[in-house]
Amino acid sequence: MNISTIGAGYVGLITGLGFAQKGHNVICIDIDKSKVSQINQGKAPIYEIGLDSRLAACVKQKGNLKASLDYNELLNSAITFICVDTPSGSSGSINLSHVIDSAIEIGRVLAKVNKHQVIVVKSTVIPGTTEHVIIPILEKYSSKKAGKDFGVAVNPEFLQEGKALYCFLNPDRITIGEYNLRAGDMLQEIYRDFPAPVLRTTLRTA
């Protein structure tokens, strides 16, 4: 499949590289020009043993992973993962500004396409965020309806820094929270070759 990640930091890059190693075509979208440039040179902007060589293999040899600043690259995606950071404020509250910005841009892209796409929330958010914040933004900016015109799912990450790629490729479980059955089915399909049980549930539970 054609897969995209929004955010090319720890979660976004590892997710994108993991799927690229499984043979999918991946685009990592980020607003950081230097990070995008590094990735397109086959150099990881984060440190992990063996990451540079694996990234270079997908970027330069296989040619199935690249980074971009342009959200319009999502036009041909089947599945887009939101992997931006959600830092905590001084009071402990969650900062959703990057998630909101991403949802707005994704919604604008969805307005331009006629095929069904699935938007997957992988960023760490509190229960209810997908239903009450992200989906309304996607619907507003796309003028389309979630569950009908596009799919939505939640797929939380369980990564250990320092061995994140290994953790991604060898999970003990894969959790899929689905807004609609088609979204869950598509997400499960890209995890078909992963050696782990798949747990399918609701957005809030995931």
Image (cartoon, rainbow, N blue to C red):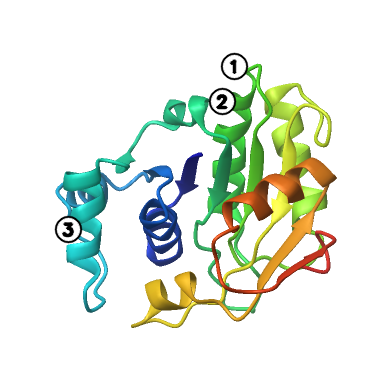
> Whole-percent x and y of residue 14?
40, 63
Q: Residue at x 24, y 69 (%)?
A: 51
- Quick check: 108 above or below 15? above
Q: Secondary structure at mark 1?
A: loop
Q: Secondary structure at mark 2?
A: helix
Q: Is residue 88 visible?
A: yes
Query: Mark 1 highlights which residue?
Result: 112
Q: Nearer the viewer, residue 124 or 57?
A: 57
> Whole-percent x and y of residue 28?
39, 46
Residue 161, labelled with which disc?
Answer: none
Tell which circle, 1 or 3, labels the residue nearer the N-terminal end. 3
Q: Residue at x 74, y 44 (%)?
A: 183
Query: Mark 3 highlights which residue?
Result: 43
Give the amino acid at mark 3.
Answer: Lys
Query: Mark 2 highlights which residue?
Result: 109
> Whole-percent x and y of residue 81?
55, 49
Q: Secondary structure at mark 3?
A: loop
- Classify residue 172 as left or right of residue 163: right
Instruction: Tell me the mark number nearer the camera, choosing from 2 and 3.
Output: 3
Q: Is residue 40 visible?
A: no
For residue 89, what is the image quadrant?
Answer: bottom right
For residue 122, what is the image quadrant?
Answer: bottom right
Give the amino acid at mark 2.
Answer: Val
- Quick check: 101 above or below 97? above
